[in-house]
Image: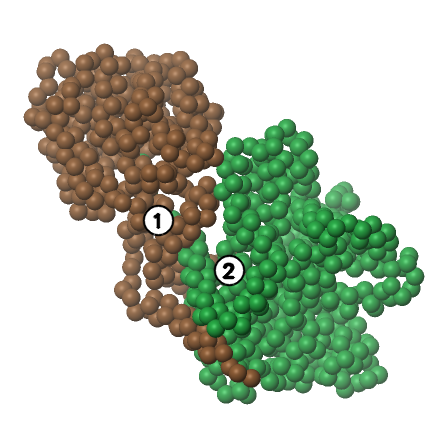
Amino acid sequence: MKRNPWNLVTVVLFALLLLAVPLAFLLLPYRTFSDAERRYLADAPKLGEQDLSDWSYDDKVETFLADHLPLRNALVSVNAYVTLYTGRQVSADVYMDRDGYLVEAPVDFDAKEIEMRLTRIAKLGETAGLTPRLLVVPSTGWVRNGKLPKTLAALYRDEKALQKIAETQGVSLVPIAEKFRTEGTEWFYRTDHHWTADGAFAAYEAYMRAAGHEPLSKDAFERRTVDGYVGSTRSRSALWLTKADALTIDAPKDCSVTVTFSDDDATYHSLFFEAHLDEYDWYPLFLDGNHPITVIENGRAEEDAPVLLLVKDSFGNTLAPLLVPSYKTIVMVDPRYSKQSVSELAKQYGADELLFCYSIERIATDPGLRLLK
Amino acid sequence: MVFSSLTFLFAFLPVTLIGYYLLPKKWKIGFLLLASLVFYAWGEPLYVLLMIGSIVINWLIGLLMDKSERHKKAFLVASVVLNLALLFAFKYTGLFWNTVKGLFPAPLSQKTVSIRLPIGISFFTFQIMSYVIDLYRGKTKVQKNPVRFGAYVTMFPQLIAGPIVRYVDIEAQLENPDLSIDSISDGVRQFLVGLGKKVLIANTMGTLFSQLSATPTENGVLGAWIGLFAYSFQIYFDFSGYSDMACGLGRMLGFRFVQNFNYPYIADSVTDFWRRWHISLSTWFREYVYIPLGGNRRGPARQILNLMIVWALTGLWHGASWNFVVWGMYYGVLLTLEKLFSGKVLQKLPKVVRRLFTFLIASIGWGIFYFTDFSALGVYFGSLIGIHNAGLLSQVSAAWCLGFLPTLLLAAVASTPLFANLAGKLEKYRWFAPVRLVGCVVLFVLCIASLASQSYNPFIYFRF
């Protein structure tokens, strides 16, 4: 019988593949941290520590191997693109829309969960004697709805949650959602879930008007862009071919600030922490990322300028620099990290206004807001 | 250890194959036994002792049966009782106790019994029994070499999920495994096809079904049916993929196992379906239960009884829960009906209708198979006929079903012999072999990509 030479090639190639992976694993440098996933990779499990009656050594070894598989990021990306191009986006955490924007999958809004948080917020306002204003950033998928396939677009129900907030007694919703939907399709990053400087500026104007102030014009700020920004949605999706963004930064012109953090003894004199541009994650450029409590004193403020208490998630970090020129003090609280009573903070600093700046996902899901007091 | 794991593919398999190929022939089987014990102990470090004990005792009984013609039957009975007792103790004690407790609650302690099931016990017990019974019937010679016997039972490709290899089918190969390049390359291809079926199709269908089965009252009628079909494909590609991997690994080691699946979803009757689904199990039950009970030789009434017994047992073999018995009986009744009259009616219908009808029956069967909880079964089956008033297809289900439609269609086509027939036709062209090889490499990379992604877990909470 004539032998098919390709059978030999098949066997040799399979053998090489089976051997190449373990060899590469042994020879390549051992990584303990993944930049792309921003987490420590699994340590090699030790056999001696295993309990025979509750055996999980096999699972631990599998996790370890998966974490340290050679070309892991490339393979994960291959899988992400296969999922995308076979139409199964709906099963991913992040969708890609027609313009190549990476958009977080929608959150299922639980009416009870939202109500519970709103009640907390309203009650807090009552205790502090201030009307809580809510600046709720709509989801990228809802804003860019027309760019998504119809079946996926239908899953974004932000208007339901916004309606709920608008109807709640004791809180005041700052109207920005419609403006975002009509004008703001470019107000989010392609590779990150955050808003751009334009998005933050639109929210700033809306808040200032809602609070009865005249917003400053764009001339009062200096626009700067830094190319090569890669954000969270690209990390999560592993769609590594997505083009990087330009990070946009609006810095108030002639300003003099003192910034202090509750978890750091030093005092800083800038709203922007440039050192983070050398790291994998650039977003902490704005006010050094999330801290339990951040206090910004404006050295050039007029004597009767108001004090703002800003309860926020990370969207607040880009909003705060825009608000700085109009306030004497801005106290930022992140309830995910701070257990301190917000109403007491309001008293302590003599707050004149109370603003909640949150993405709509966080309003619906942040555990910190449930414990607010 | 499962085949579709990185541990198996990149640690166990290369080491085992290198050792197996490099060792001289007389050491190969011993090495295979050792590797298989490691394979089992990796996931079951305690129960491996149970399996070794069972092998040693049955091997000894085999020797005794061979020595003493007079007590042959007694030894057979001892072996069968012992094997079934082990299976019962480790697999069915919980079900038995909880059922008895439910029937007579007052006098019994309300303690629940839960014994962890040793992986593969249903498979290796049946393999061992096939040896002892065939030895009694004089269909095979005694295996005096405990290493060969141990290797037969534990051989890692078929140890934990079949196919159920009968001793008579592999006896000769244990002496002389076929390690030609052609055989090994066939094995490699079959293994990769099986891996692809499991990782790329079964897992994907599983994702769709777990989404839809989590919200049975909200999917809508169409969503419920698509979910059920997705599960039918999941279970077929999972199980037949695993069998393909087993057969492929067997070929790589020089053994040819029986074919376990023969495109069951193109079956045109329930009888035909069971000739094509998990063939090694139906063969086992026919050979060792149905025929010894008298099969169809003792009149129609007895035949029906025999069918019912066999199918109740077949159901129970699949799991220690009453829904499996119901599932088995469902087939017992359908097969009886088909034998008595509906078979003749069905024959008059066009083939495509008969096939779709059979697939529908199998899918409903998988619904019974999946839900171990009868009230959950009721809720899901209710959604199939629209009792939850969720319309035809909810928005969420529409997004999922449409998104998974390409994979569903691929699964449907891959359930037929179309690809195999096409390959058979193209084999004569010179370009086919290299193209097929490239296809195999791509398949392998896609599978590894999918496995690697399972632990991809960006930690970004702190950024919000």
Direction from residue B83 to residue B292 in the image, left or right: right
Residue B32: x, y in percent? 54, 78
Q: Colour of chain A?
A: brown
Circle 1 sits on which residue? A238
Q: Residues within 10 Å of mark 2 (few under 14, many from 20)?
A: many
Dot 2 falls on a residue whose secondary structure is helix
Q: Confirm or deny contact between disc 1 and disc 2 (CB under 8 A).
A: no
Residue B422: image quadrant is bottom right
Residue A233: x, y in percent? 33, 41
Q: Residues within 10 Å of mark 1 (few under 14, many from 20)?
A: many
Front residue (pair B17, B1): B17
Badge 2: chain ID:
B
In the rendered structure, find residue B196 and report the number of the disc placed on it: 2
Dot 1 falls on a residue whose secondary structure is loop
Tell me if residue A151 comes above or below residue A252 in the rendering: below
- Chain letter of the green region: B
